[in-house]
Image (spheres, coloured by chain):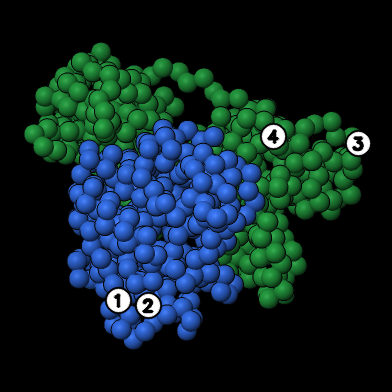
Chain colours: A blue, B green
Amino acid sequence: MLDLKDLENRSIYIVREAYAEFKRPAVLWSMGKDSTTMLWLCRKAFFGQIPFPVIHIDTSYKFKQMYQYRDHLAREWGFELVIAKNETAIEEGCSPEEGKFECCTRLKTEALKNCLEERGFDALILAIRRDEHGIRAKERYFSPRDEQFKWDYKDQPLEMWDHFQGLLGKGTHMRIHPILHWRELDVWEYVKQEGMPVNPMYFARNGQRYRSLGCEPCTLPIASNAATIDEIVEELRTTRVAERAGRAQDKEKTFTMQKLRALGYM
Amino acid sequence: MNLNAVIVGHVDHGKSTLIGRLLYDSEVLPEDRLAEIQKLLEEYKKRFEFAYFLDSFEEELQEERTIDTTRVLFKGKGENYYTIVDVPGHKEFIKNMLTGACYAQVAILVVSAPDGVQEQTRRHAFLAHMLGIDDVIVVVNKMDLVDYQQSTFDKVKTETAELLSSLGYNNPIFISVSAMEGDNVYRPSGKMPWYQGATLIEVLDSLKPKEAEEKPLRFVVQDVYTVGAEKITVGRVESGRLKKGDELVFQPSNLKGKVEKIKLFPEEIAEAVSGDSIGILVDCEPRRGDVAGLLSSQPKTVTSFLGEVALLEGTLGKGDEIEMKCGTKRAWCQVDEIREQINSETGAVIGKDIDRIGENEAAVIVFKTEPMVIENFSEMPELGRFILSRKKKNIGAGVVLGAE
């Protein structure tokens, strides 16, 4: 097992570096296990009070339970919740039926883009992990996005010894990935150790559970009887099914994830 | 133990293939990954390569080369966990190689049996040495292409041993491998009766953690937060131990203070050790960039030092001002002297007391700097390594050879 203390120490160091180096950071929260862990780490890093806004990109297609969990935790932990929504696209009836790539780009990437423009955020803290997806495995801890939101994955910065790249120009922003080095199993071990509140949808009911949470139309449960954190940990030790197997947008076409991310998707 | 291993070597000598094979044979890959790759191969009319488990960019598949570094986590047959880092072998991607290699404790140098030592074999070995990687394991790969002949293995071994010994690596382990065929990677090979050595996974699993020596306390300040009525100085213990009640000295601010509390939300602790990200309450106001130590072994402030630098972009000349960062301190410094110009491929000194170095060159440089705390890389690597940047863009890295 990886040492949870080491993982936590490093992530807290990175969050504090981001806070020291950027004027207007914010953290993204999807209410999933990873980004909730990220919020937990932020609370630790700043002694209980997250000193920047928490953004939820609301596609309007999230599960009902996720909205309940969101509002509950926002009250309990007392952070500033910003809801980013592409109202125009939602009004126009944008949906995954007309293409998942288009839908993800409009409802997530564009919603985030508008939110950044309005609020002037220059750094976004995100809870992606290398072991989730081959494209995410290529990421840096501090990863620049240009004015058009684009990720220049063919020319990523030199990043050594916890010395991270600074902001390159006006209108650009930095993606900060403090838990890039965690694995899915580590997240669950940490959830257990810390007694963190997690969305109940992760726990099995009637032989099914969600392993990765997204929008309702594009997220499928897996067959599982893991109804407790311990059972999830046990399941992950032996499974050979990919974590994002139930996430449709990754699989629409080859290299969809790369193309989505190049445009500024999370 | 969790070990960081980086796979280095010349382009096309089979670095990604080696890791792909390791992952494949150890059956850690998700079941649908192979099917996913098969689908890709049909679409792009490519033949199967183990490298495609790592090379996940479309361009990497199309061009059949690794562009950027990837890390994979992997458990050995024993208790060891590995973070295995794949890096590109092309010269144009040296910054990606350094990004991947900088945390490694072990380098696995892949040398193709039919090709032998090449330009990036040398450069990667030189850079691994500069980064302070202590152990090198040599994989002589593509043995299938030379009919598994001992004579070829021996020839490559001699040539590589010579290169490594010139850098100070004296007893590297050599493994005779075909990553493509799976010989001596995860499973022993039956095709080389003359080879008595271990497989790659056996060699990795036999590595033991180095005993950490007790070093003096260095606490690097990241920031000061006001939380309620408290001013909390946050940062990381880079070495040694920090205890409640310790009398600290912060440099270069030259402040003294007593540790009243050590905070690790939601608790208070009595002692923190190296690696810990903590907050402390002290009766002084240090700043980001300060380094704290105990009165008995204070961190020293310098205004000039000797460093060995690898420059990855542009040129750097005598009199040039450049920004550097060591720990959390950003400081302006100036190139005072370029004592040695080093060929980053061979490690050879190719010029002395020169005026300017170019892209992808290395050099031993005397820097003048704003007051800051640095340590010798050989004694305290955490504060003995730095990055160089121009207009906020990271363009080079270096290690501290000594104060001047």
Q: Nearer the viewer, mark 4 or mark 1?
A: 1
Sequence-earlier tag: 4 or 3: 4
Q: Residues within 10 Å of mark 1 (few under 14, many from 20)?
A: many
**Whole-percent x, y for residue A156 in the image:** 44, 59
The amino acid type found where label 3 is placed reads Pro
> What whole-number distance in Å separates the C-alpha atoms at marks 4 and 3?
24 Å
Is the residue under label 2 in contact with that under label 1 (CB below 8 Å)?
yes
Q: CA distance from mark 4 to mark 2?
A: 46 Å
The quadrant in which the N terminus of chain B is found is: top right
Q: In the rendering, at what x and y percent does residue A129 appear? A: 46, 52
Dot 2 amino acid type: Arg
Residue position marked by numbered label 4 in the rendering: B77
Q: Of label 1 and label 2, which has the lower sequence position? A: 1
Helix, strand or loop at label 2? It is helix
Is there one chain holding both mark 4 and mark 2? no
**Disc 1 to disc 2, how far (Cα)?**
7 Å
What residue would you read off at disc 2?
Answer: A106
Task: Report, in whole angstroms, how far the alpha carbon at label 3 lies from the one at label 2.
Answer: 61 Å
How far across and down, in percent of the image, does residue A185 sit? 52, 43
- Disc number for residue A86: 1
Task: Give the side of residue B205 with respect to residue B180, left or right.
Answer: left
